[in-house]
Image (cartoon, rainbow, N blue to C red):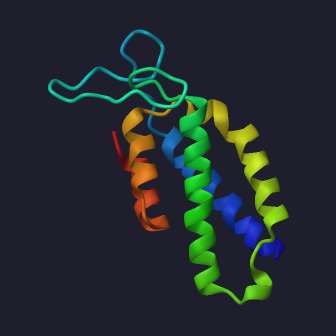
Amino acid sequence: MIRAVVVFVVFLLALAAACSSHPPKTNGTGTGAGAPDAGAATPPTGDGAGGAVSAADCDRVIDHVLGVMNDELRAQVPEDEWPTEEQLAESRARLATDFMDECRQYDRAVIDCILAGKDSAAIAECATVE
């Protein structure tokens, strides 16, 4: 069971490292939102405005990635190796603490890409989004 939790944490840390290799775009406001795309509207999100990445956005990223990884893990390993709800909650809390500041610096397109990812391969591709 511990191995399963390690798989989750390693994946998210790898995703965070990959995403951080692309510095966030800024529009001079320090929000990390990037320059607005002509003709593209950025919807307000969570507790942030416009394209700014909020803590609520990052909470959704963590929950989504943990959910995707949990689903994939359950399809690949015996049930006795599945993480417990307690282990998932511990991992989630640790990730929220360790990942939040970095996540809030991501470009809106990376966040949107991660949230749209249906599997770990699609989520991993988000590291290349600019």
Residue 64 % position (x, y):
55, 55
Which image quadrant is residue 4 in? bottom right
For image coordinates 49% across by 66% down, the residue present is: 120
Q: Is residue 86 above or below residue 76?
A: above
Q: How many marks?
A: 0
Q: Is residue 88 above or below residue 97?
A: below
Tell which of 85 and 24 is nearer to you. 85
Work out which residue is located at the far left of the displayed protein and give it.
39
The x and y percentages for residue 129 are: 35, 45
6, above or below 110, in the image: below
Q: Residue at x 40, y 27 (%)?
A: 44
The quadrant in which residue 111 appears is top left
Q: Residue at x 55, y 25 (%)?
A: 47
- The N terminus is located in which quarter? bottom right
Looking at this view, name the residue that lies furthest to the top. Answer: 29
**Horizontal relation, residue 30 to residue 51: left or right:** right
Image quarter hosting the C terminus: top left
- Residue under the point 64% across and 52% down: 13
